[in-house]
Image (cartoon, helix red, strand yellow):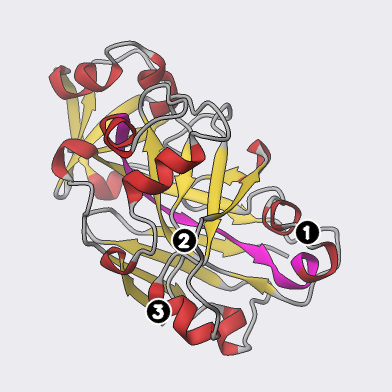
Amino acid sequence: MLLGVTSNGIVRIDGDEVSRLDLPHRDLTELLAEPDGRAAALAATVVDRAALADVSLRCPLGASSSIWGVGLNYHAKAAETGRGVPDTPILYVKPGPALAGPGAVVPIPAVPSDELDYEAEVALVVGAVLDCASPDEAWAAVAGITAANDLTARDVMRTTGNPGLAKGFTGFSPVGPTMRTADELTPDFDLGVRGYVNGELRQDGRTSDFIFGAADLLARVSQFTTLRPGDVVLTGTPPGTGQDRGEFLAAGDRLTVEVDGLLPLHNTLGG
């Protein structure tokens, strides 16, 4: 099932039609915080329907969501950069204000940066509390996946040595516009992940190239913190970033992330 959020509540997307569900929640974070939230979404009745073209989808998650990320999680990315495959995930956490929705204009940071970069990613959305979980327990707690763009100021990362600072600027983690529910996925899901700048394909990978699989990655994050419903775990980016190409973003650039089975995520880098 493909879910989204509008100003009128939670919706299900069926091809070119949007069905508003009889749910009282403002976003998927609120829904998933309910003990039976995932089941409620599957069982909810339809209030009304509209054409997808006539609906504006918002950020599917709430401001209380935390955002975790991982560096170097594609074998092809490691090969392109000449770095060895890590033995353990390279983890970082992003502050809440980094979260943004589809269509958002991403502010250019006040901290000077000449190396603003894009990272097309699949994001795991947590659907239940996870603490020191096994991979099987972790996957059972996944609510679904969404598209994400893990923007990064590469020169800030280099000068500070802190990924959380370089990736944590306001609006630097757009997600959405849809979440594909986990009942349609397996732990070893194989989906295409593509990133575009101004309509030009820059990244083209598959999640079968993960170094750390989705369930394993989520379980490892849960060793360091308690994950709660609505939290996001980014799964890394394939090769083709601006850093890989030596070609960084400029104000006004249009960014698109495509993940198979989801609606594309569009954003613009602001002035």
The residue that appears at 17% across and 46% down in the rendered structure is 186
Alpha carbons under labels 1 and 2: distance apart: 22 Å
- Percent x, y for residue 104? 55, 51
Q: Is residue 57 visible in the rendered structure shown here?
A: no
Characterize the local packing of mark 1: few (<14), some (14-19) or many (20 or more) Cα atoms within 10 angstroms: some
Tell me the residue that label 3 is attached to.
76
**Identity, as a three-letter code, of the amino acid under mark 1:** Pro
Sequence-first tag of 1 and 2: 1
The residue that appears at 74% across and 61% down in the rendered structure is 108
- Percent x, y for residue 54? 29, 45
Q: Give the range drawn in magenta.
A: 141-157
Rendered position, 47 above or below 172: above
- Percent x, y for residue 207? 30, 63
Alpha carbons under labels 3 and 1: distance apart: 30 Å
Rendered image: mark on residue 236: 2
Give SS at disc 3: helix
**Identity, as a three-letter code, of the amino acid under mark 2:** Gly
Rendered position, 166 above or below 6: below
Q: In which quarter of the image is residue 224?
A: top right
Q: Which of marks 1 and 2 is in front?
A: 2
Tell me the residue that label 1 is attached to.
109
Sequence-first tag of 2 and 3: 3
Q: Is residue 167 visible in the rendered structure shown here?
A: yes
